[in-house]
Amino acid sequence: MEKKLYVGNLSYKVTEDDLKDLFKEFGAVTEVSLITDRATGRSRGFGFVEFSSSDDADKAIKSCNGKLVQGRKIVVSEARPRKNSGHRSRQY
């Protein structure tokens, strides 16, 4: 079963490739997404990494939470389900 992780407190210089390289040692990474500002295209300092195995994701959380990456201690936890804010579905 797949499991998605939240990765926060990232340096603005971290790339999706950097994240994939960091997490691939724990198992098969199926998706990496770095969240960027729509207006500037600049990283917002967090992203998501999805593993094909729940066990691999748990190992990554234990090993990487608090790890120093490009000068910052990153936060790694299981991603919470996205809330539907309704902003995009409003009709006027």
Image (tube, rainbow, N blue to C red):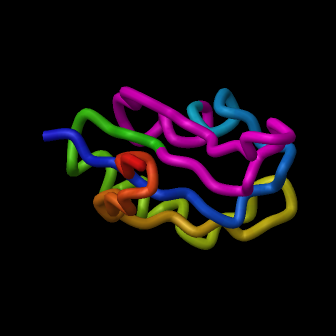
Depth check: 75 or 22 in front? Answer: 75
Where in the figure is residue 54, as x and y percent of width and height?
Answer: 21, 48
Q: Which residues are magenta?
A: 21-48
Residue 40 lies in the magenta-colored region:
yes
Residue at position x 35%, y 47% from top?
89
Q: Residue at x 36, y 58 (%)?
A: 86
Compared to residue 16, the image places residue 45 above or below, namely below
Q: Nearer the viewer, residue 14 or 27?
A: 14
> Which quadrant is home to the N terminus?
top left
In percent of width and height, residue 83 lies at: 33, 62
**Residue 75 pos. (x, y %):** 58, 69
Q: Residue furthest left?
A: 1
- Report the residue at 42% width, 49% height from top: 92
Say left or right for 63 vs 74.
left
Res 61 quadrant in image:
bottom left
**Left or right: where does residue 56 sit relative to residue 71?**
left
Q: Residue at the location (55% across, 57% down)?
A: 7
Point out residue 18 in the picture as x, y percentages from the top left corner.
69, 35
